[in-house]
Amino acid sequence: MNLKKKICAITLAGTVAVSGMGLGYAAWHTNITANGGVSASGHWDVAITDARISQLSGATIGSQSTEITGCAFQLSGQTTQEAVAAAVAAKAQGPVGSPSDSETLGEGFFVVDTSIYDIENIAALSLSEVAADGSSALDLSSRPRYYRTDSSGSSDDAAVVQALFTDTYEMLAASNPAEALHDHYALVYLSSDSAQNAVYAVTQQQTNTTVTDTETTFTATSADFADVSFTSPGGWAEYTITVTNNGTVDAVLDSNSVQLDTENDQLELKTPDLSSDVLAPGQSCTFTFTVQAKADITDDLNDTGTLSVSLSYTQPAVEPIPVPTHSVHN
């Protein structure tokens, strides 16, 4: 009886001890947490912001005009600035390029209307006949000479010639304003010895052809250029497209194509290298290309064609996303 009680007591004590050890292990633990914020923002906006035919020559579109913008004397043929300056230079010294107070050009200097007088045959012009013509010739004999050398000995032929031409043209314009912008006057010197006759300069009309392309239309992603008619061999037209990146990431020109298909191969296309075009946000790029009627055409111009342009922009390449992994390591 006493023995049994002792055994039971030992067994119970062992059971309690083991249970106590189990409760101590479960109390050790770690909770691991992680957090972070994510967002997505940005937009893609690559668009045409301008498209037009910017300039042309030997070709026409519906909306263009040619304007005479001015006219000025230009040296004629083999005439040199030095020769003209020597002919009109004052003997006295003074501010280079300014008119003399006392010396005049004298007999023989005229501005003549080249639609009346044949300056190609200048030796045939008669000093007396031209001097007597009050309608087609302006006598410059009383006009001043110009200082070619100043008091220090410095000289400037170009300044003398420029002053002469400027003053002469202003006089021509004032005396005959209706004709002042026409390309048919010459500054000549005539002598009683016709072998000394000379053409110093002719008026050079300055014109400006303004292309106001109101026929080309465009949207953000397409353009329809005005039709161009090439009127002479070598005639050309320049086409312009401006693309702007209004987005928030780079825009890479992934592929491009500019093609001209013609019926009779009289027209040719020239394009720039577009292989490495990248537009950062806010940047624009203007592409120009030309179409030209071949300059060596000897037959009549007889061709039609279709122009096509394709520019494909894409976002920069994104690196491949990594595969989620799990590994245990020391």
Image: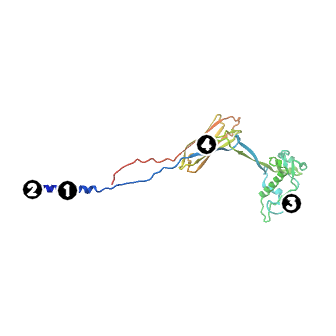
The label shown at residue 16 is 1
Q: Nearer the viewer, residue 236 or 145?
A: 236
Residue 153 is situated, as x and y percent measured from the top left of the image, at 78, 64
Q: Earlier along the polypeptide chain: callout 1 or callout 4?
A: 1
Packing grade of label 2 (10 A; few <14, some 14-19, many >=20) is: few
Whether 285 is drawn above or below 153: the answer is above
Label pair 1/4, CB-CB below 8 angstroms:
no
Q: Which one is closest to the eye, mark 2 or mark 3?
A: 2
State the SS at label 3: strand
Q: From the image, state whether disc 1 or disc 4 is nearer to you.
A: 1
The residue where tag 2 is placed is 3
Question: For mark 3, what is the residue?
Answer: 103
Residue lying at 13% horizontally and 55% vertically, measured from the top left: 8
Horizontal relation, residue 50 to residue 168: left or right = left
Visible in this render: residue 273? no
Q: CA distance from mark 1 to mark 2?
A: 21 Å
Front disc: 1 or 3? 1
Rendered location of residue 57, percent (x, y): 70, 43
The type of colouring in the image is rainbow
